[in-house]
Amino acid sequence: MPTMGRRERRKAQTRQALSQAALRLFSERGYDGVTVAQIADEADVSIATLFAHVPDGKEALIFDDGAERHVWLSAAVRERPPGQTVLQALRRCMAARGPFATDLPPEQRRKRDLIVATPALREYSRKLWIAGEQPLAEAIAGASGRDPADMTVRALARYVLEIPELAGAEPDPSAALNAVFDLLESGWPEPPPPA
Amino acid sequence: MPTMGRRERRKAQTRQALSQAALRLFSERGYDGVTVAQIADEADVSIATLFAHVPDGKEALIFDDGAERHVWLSAAVRERPPGQTVLQALRRCMAARGPFATDLPPEQRRKRDLIVATPALREYSRKLWIAGEQPLAEAIAGASGRDPADMTVRALARYVLEIPELAGAEPDPSAALNAVFDLLESGWPEPPPPA
DNA sequence: TCTGAATCTATAGTGATTATAGTTTCAGAA
DNA sequence: TTCTGAAACTATAATCACTATAGATTCAGA
């Protein structure tokens, strides 16, 4: 079975039609200005079919399966070059992804802007990131000889995964990203630099 | 005007009746097993009245106004004794509140357990905490001679406010709280302790 | 006492999401 | 090739959170 059968191809087509219809309509009228019925119509499927394809609901329509998102980060930790710290690997990997990527094609840029500007979509995006906490914690634990259930490990994983939502809407996302990673690497600098 | 007029008293009574009805029914049948109509019935008001009292919706029913939550933390930072660092003040303050409080009366303990065990309520609780990011950032900035918009300041505020959701469900919440504060104070310890 | 705003009510929506039951279509076995 | 079961799809109806409207009651303050 080299590719997919016609069946799975049709399924993928339907899912893509839904994504594209949703992105187009959201861009035109805003997230709240579009009903799932209109999206289903635009994609020429029934409402029930829409929900069969997108069990997580309206917000998930424009996200391709979120399971992939954390794979990059876990892999970046596990396969980092010798001598590179865990946080260096994470910082580099994240700088190229999500809201921090530069030089995106215009379609993806529109999607990213839509997500950043829409609270419901931002929240869902965060949920997808946070879903990767456990795998990332395991990668970090493996790289530093600790227990994945260690609260310090879990906290680091969580805090790294929160960065897109925390820094993604800043005027200079890259600078913000680096500031947060500096905090995680060195801790909060106290006492402050003397006047 | 020493106390409140009859009018505001009735309003407070209604709101309290709603809270109590919601907490009782949620405890009995679980959050998803109760409809807002049933809660309104139990409190003997109409559905429209319920939503007039609780504009944020079903999840907000068992929370008393969230505006108070961050006041503690901001005050703890601003009024900390001389010589105490910002993070020491925050650690102490938080250890006594939210999911970390010990020796709660049974009613409040039931409520806390319900929140921790119910994803929708946990999320809303987090939202209430996060709403205090700006004031807390201002307090931290004031205490350390920085700009409240500084990403390091915002990140610290955010990360502190995430602690209840991150550590609240741990077997030993106090130990978890301390582990996370240690991370924020000193940063991620790398390289790891040699084998 | 009068007036206006606040509170509450019933009623009827909207919109997301789920449940049900039946139809078409394809994949793989016989 | 033909049969068969599962998968994808459909229409329909229901549930539930939440909002909008318009009218009734009640209290605060002039």
Image: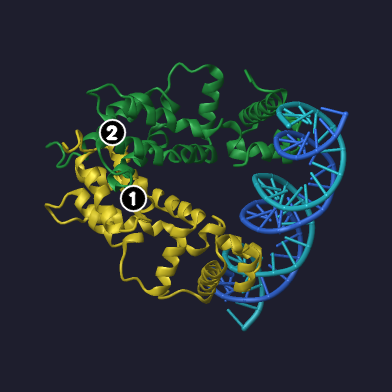
Chain colours: A yellow, B green, C blue, D cyan
Question: Where is mark 1, residue-wise?
Answer: A163
Quarter placement of the C terminus of chain B: top left
The answer to whether B50 appears left or right of C3 in the picture is left
Q: Which of A172 and B119 is in front in this view?
A: A172
The answer to whether C4 appears left or right of B156 in the picture is right
How many residues crowd around disc 1 within 10 Å: few (fewer than 14), some, or many (20 or more)?
Answer: some
**Residue located at (25% from left, 42% from top):** A141
User: Secondary structure beneath disc 2?
Assistant: helix
How many residues crowd around disc 2 within 10 Å: few (fewer than 14), some, or many (20 or more)?
Answer: some
Q: Which of A179 and A71 is in front in this view?
A: A179
The vertical placement of C26 against B103, above or below, is below
Badge 2: chain ID = B
Question: Where is mark 2, residue-wise?
Answer: B143
Which quadrant of the view contains residue B80? Answer: top left
**Residue located at (61% from left, 36% from top):** B31
- Residue B182, position in %: x, y? 25, 32
